[in-house]
Structure formats: structure tokens, C-alpha cells
């Protein structure tokens, strides 16, 4: 049987594939991001990076990266993970995603009856 979100359970609808649940939740909360913002977010998904590093990796001007990072931080998709003064006296600020990363291929969870 299929739930209101289009998630299919097993025969008696008590077991649900967790990956399907996450995909359905992502579809419900889907945000429209422009290509540059999407590339910035994906760059920081693996590990925190500075806006300068993202600029070099993605070829996006650093001022645009900073604008988009501040916006992503405001909406809760990025957070500042580390900030320090390096040996040259410059402040280095690292940002990382707040998105959950699914490391499990498939896991079944029991739904309440």
C-alpha cells in the first residue's frame, strides 16, 4: 500500500524503507536553488571548506560564493564549523552543510501500527 507521500511499505505496511522515506521528505521540502548555489552546497557536502576554496574548486567568484554562503547559512543549510586567524593574520572561516548524509544503503524501520 502507498502512503500519502507516495512511500510504499511492505505487505502489511509496517516496514518502510528508510531511503524511500528520506527521498519523500526531500521531495516535500524541495528547494529551488540556482546552479551556482547548488554547486557551492555540493562542494561543502563532503567536508567543510572556506568560501575561497569553493571559489577555486567551482570557478565561481569569491564574492558570489560569500553571498550565497551567507544566504545558505541564514536558511539553515550551512553552518560555520571553524574560524581561526592564520599565520598571515587573515581570518579563515570554514563552513559545512547541515544536511544529513545517508551512509546506509538500505535500512528497514518499523512503522507504528
Image (cartoon, rainbow, N blue to C red):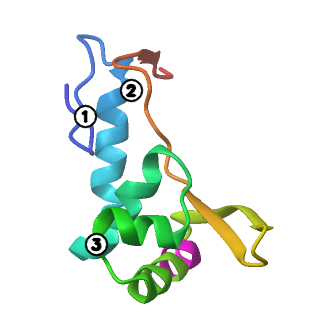
Residue 95: image location, x then y, percent = 59, 63
Q: Report the side of 103 relative to 42 (left or right).
A: right
> 10 Å neighbourhood of mark 2: few (<14), some, or many (≥20)?
some
For the stretch drawn in magenta, what is the main secondary structure? helix
Nearest to the eye among marks 3 and 2: give it.
3
Magenta range is: 71-75
Residue 110: image location, x then y, percent = 47, 16
Q: 94 or 70, which lies in front?
A: 94
Residue at 37%, 68% (x, y): give it.
56
Q: Tell whether label 1 touches label 3 (CB within 8 Å).
A: no
Which residue, given by chain and number where applicable, does mark 2 sit on? 18
Which residue, given by chain and number where applicable, does mark 1 sit on? 7
Please identify the residue farthest to the front as the structure is shown: 88
Instruction: Quadrant for residue 64, please give it.
Output: bottom left
Q: Report the side of 92 relative to 69 (left or right).
A: right
Instruction: Quadrant for residue 41, please give it.
Output: bottom left
Residue 73 in magenta? Answer: yes
Residue at 75%, 74% (x, y): give it.
88
Q: Report the side of 33 relative to 74 (left or right).
A: left
Work out whether 62 lies above or below 113. Answer: below
> 10 Å neighbourhood of mark 1: few (<14), some, or many (≥20)?
some
Report, in whole angstroms, how far the alpha carbon at label 2 lies from the one at label 1: 10 Å
Amino acid at each position: 500500500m502507498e502512503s500519502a507521500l507516495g512511500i510504499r511499505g511492505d505487505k502489511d505496511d509496517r516496514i518502510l524503507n528508510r531511503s524511500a522515506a528520506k527521498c519523500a521528505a526531500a521531495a516535500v521540502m524541495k528547494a529551488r536553488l540556482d546552479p551556482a548555489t547548488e554547486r557551492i552546497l555540493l562542494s561543502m557536502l563532503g567536508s567543510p571548506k572556506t568560501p575561497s576554496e569553493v571559489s577555486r574548486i567551482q570557478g565561481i567568484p569569491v564574492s558570489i560564493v560569500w553571498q550565497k554562503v551567507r544566504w545558505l547559512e541564514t536558511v539553515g543549510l550551512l553552518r560555520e564549523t571553524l574560524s581561526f586567524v592564520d599565520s598571515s593574520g587573515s581570518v579563515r572561516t570554514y563552513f559545512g552543510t547541515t544536511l544529513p548524509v545517508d551512509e546506509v544503503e538500505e535500512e528497514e524501520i518499523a512503522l507504528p501500527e
